[in-house]
Image: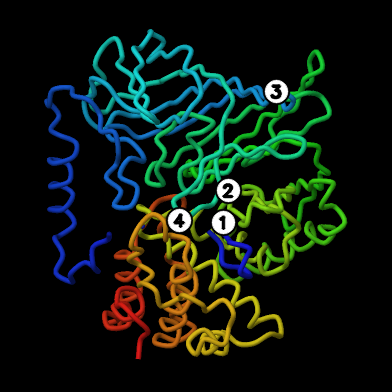
């Protein structure tokens, strides 16, 4: 995410850095399996209503892992009514007598599990389904939820808006950190990524844009269905649908298809955006390694009061015509955040510190100030983006209201620059590329990044990371 004002800062109590004396991997895995999943013969019991995220304890659900979402949506821009059917394929990670999905608002019309009716109960944003028969551990099952209503926007703990947002001629769905549950039922936590098929039917003349690639577009009786497919795993908060009357720009550069949708209101100010997407994607491929998805692009909407951009997978969403650095930031997230996704929201700096440092590298390599000069300006407070960066350590945001605050971005980027200085450019970029290759399309955390940095550099970096990621106040 990128908060647009001030400048490019985009958009949770936390334990201190893990001790260096860690359990062996095999023992840790055994403990996790016995405490979280139960044995093979464990009796079926209800799945958890949350994954235990330190900053968002009610997000996500326990007991299963989603592999695929098939969303069939029908939206009427004039009445703002949404009809949807979600077909969710998942695997039980322990024997389940019932399980939860996250869904805010909207009326549930019908629910099935493996084709048989399932009992559904609601408690706030928790939808609990009880299948006709228990689900054994390891069993792949399919859940179908039919729902409708008028989807709503949410206000985040930091005051920003997300969820299903109306636009002048349609709507856009933005999900960081919780808003995806306003338009489809899900296991709404970054730790459970899945593939998606999203088919959206809208009146003829409207376009529905989503993640991934456009598989087909068909028109019947004055309504057009756009079917989008995302084969690579995607976190729920990165899913999007944008509905409106867009100008569409498609091309293929260096073998990579590119799809850019621009609101006509922003057309003049965004005339350079398609070429910038091409140029910046190519630079980031050279800098960070292979692009992680099958296509690239962007959505430029017209929500001037939104206040942020978002790294929705394969097509970052911009609420107005973006400048070059904002494009650099959101496209960098395709590697840092979208492909390699934090395991928990406390690790948000792994998204935002890296995307911010990508801006510094772009500036350094395109005849601007060096990354060291940017670091110095942040440290002495002369850069306008440096305000508030010492409020808390970037790896320990104090609450859910602060995951998009300046320390996560600016001080996170400063930590990366200190790492670069300590290990040298060759080792630094090897660390970044190895990080992206090792955890491609998966989840990772700060502990793993520290361990990788120490292993590849051959250095003890505990003082550096303790100082820049975990220590309070301005480092001396």
Q: Mark 2–mark 4 contact, CB under 8 Å?
A: no
Depth-wise, is mark 3 or mark 4 nearer the camera? Answer: 3
Q: Earlier in the sequence, mark 3 or mark 4?
A: 3
| Residue linked to disc 3 | 79
| Residue linked to disc 1 | 334
Q: Earlier in the sequence, mark 2 or mark 4?
A: 2
- At 60% across and 30% down in the image, what residue appears? 198
The residues bearing labels 2 and 4 have C-alpha atoms spaced at a distance of 12 Å
State left or right for residue 283 relative to residue 2: right
In this view, the residue farthest toward the right is 268
State left or right for residue 408 relative to residue 293: left
- At 42% across and 38% down in the image, what residue appears? 188
Q: Which mark is residue 179?
A: none
| Residue linked to disc 4 | 340
Depth-wise, is mark 3 or mark 1 nearer the camera? Answer: 3
The residues bearing labels 1 and 4 have C-alpha atoms spaced at a distance of 8 Å
- Residue in the foreground of this view, choosing between 363 and 301: 301
| Residue linked to disc 2 | 313
Query: Element under label 1?
Result: loop
User: For mark 3, does the 10 Å Cα neighbourhood hold few (<14), some (14 to 19), or many (20 or more) residues?
Assistant: few
Q: Mark 3–mark 4 contact, CB under 8 Å?
A: no
- Residue in the foreground of this view, choosing between 462 and 434: 462
User: For mark 1, does the 10 Å Cα neighbourhood hold few (<14), some (14 to 19), or many (20 or more) residues?
Assistant: many
- Residue in the foreground of this view, choosing between 7 and 312: 7
Query: Element under label 2?
Result: loop
Residue 407's image quarter?
A: bottom left
Question: Taking 467 as reference, is 105 above or below it?
Answer: above
Image quadrant occupied by the C terminus: bottom left
């Amino acid at each position: 995410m990128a908060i647009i004002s001030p400048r490019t800062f985009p958009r949770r109590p936390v334990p201190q850095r893990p001790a260096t004396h860690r359990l062996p991997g095999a023992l840790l895995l055994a403990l996790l399996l016995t405490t979280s999943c139960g044995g093979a013969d464990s009796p079926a019991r209800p799945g958890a209503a949350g994954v235990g995220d330190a900053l968002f304890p009610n997000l996500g659900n326990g007991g299963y892992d989603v592999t695929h979402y098939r969303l069939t949506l029908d939206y009427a821009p004039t009445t703002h009514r949404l009809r949807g059917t979600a077909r969710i394929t998942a695997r039980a990670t322990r024997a389940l007598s019932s399980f939860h999905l996250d869904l805010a608002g909207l009326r549930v019309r019908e629910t099935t599990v493996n084709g048989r009716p399932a009992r559904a109960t609601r408690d706030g944003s928790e939808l609990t389904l009880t299948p006709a028969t228990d689900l054994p551990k390891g069993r792949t099952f399919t859940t179908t939820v039919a729902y409708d209503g008028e989807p709503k926007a949410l206000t985040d703990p930091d005051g920003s808006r997300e969820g299903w947002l109306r636009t002048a001629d349609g709507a856009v769905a933005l999900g960081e950190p919780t808003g995806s549950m306003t338009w489809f039922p899900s296991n709404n936590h970054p730790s459970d990524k899945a593939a998606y098929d999203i088919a959206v039917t809208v009146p003829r003349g409207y376009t529905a844009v989503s993640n991934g690639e456009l598989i087909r577009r068909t028109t019947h009786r004055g309504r057009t269905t756009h079917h989008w497919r995302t084969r690579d795993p995607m976190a729920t908060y990165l899913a999007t649908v944008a509905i409106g009357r867009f100008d569409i720009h498609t091309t293929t550069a260096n073998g990579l298809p590119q799809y850019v949708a621009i609101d006509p209101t922003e057309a003049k100010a965004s005339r350079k955006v398609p070429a910038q997407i091409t140029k910046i994607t190519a630079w980031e491929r050279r800098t960070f390694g292979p692009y992680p998805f099958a296509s690239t692009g962007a959505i430029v909407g017209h929500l001037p009061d939104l206040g942020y951009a978002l790294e929705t997978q394969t097509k970052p969403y911009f609420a107005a015509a973006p400048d070059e650095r904002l494009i650099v930031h959101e496209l960098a997230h395709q590697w840092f955040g979208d492909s390699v996704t934090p395991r928990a929201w406390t690790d948000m700096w792994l998204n935002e510190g890296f995307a911010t440092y990508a801006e510094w590298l772009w500036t350094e390599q395109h005849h601007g100030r060096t990354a060291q000069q940017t670091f110095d300006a942040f440290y002495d407070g002369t850069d306008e983006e440096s305000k508030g960066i010492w409020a808390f350590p970037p790896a320990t945001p104090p609450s859910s209201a602060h995951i998009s605050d300046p320390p996560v971005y600016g001080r996170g980027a400063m930590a990366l620059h200190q790492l670069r200085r300590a290990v040298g450019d060759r080792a630094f970029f090897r660390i970044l590329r190895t990080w992206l290759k090792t955890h491609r399309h998966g989840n990772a955390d700060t502990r793993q990044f520290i361990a990788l940095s120490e292993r590849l550099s051959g250095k003890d970096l505990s003082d550096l990371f303790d100082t820049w990621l975990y220590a309070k106040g301005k480092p001396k």
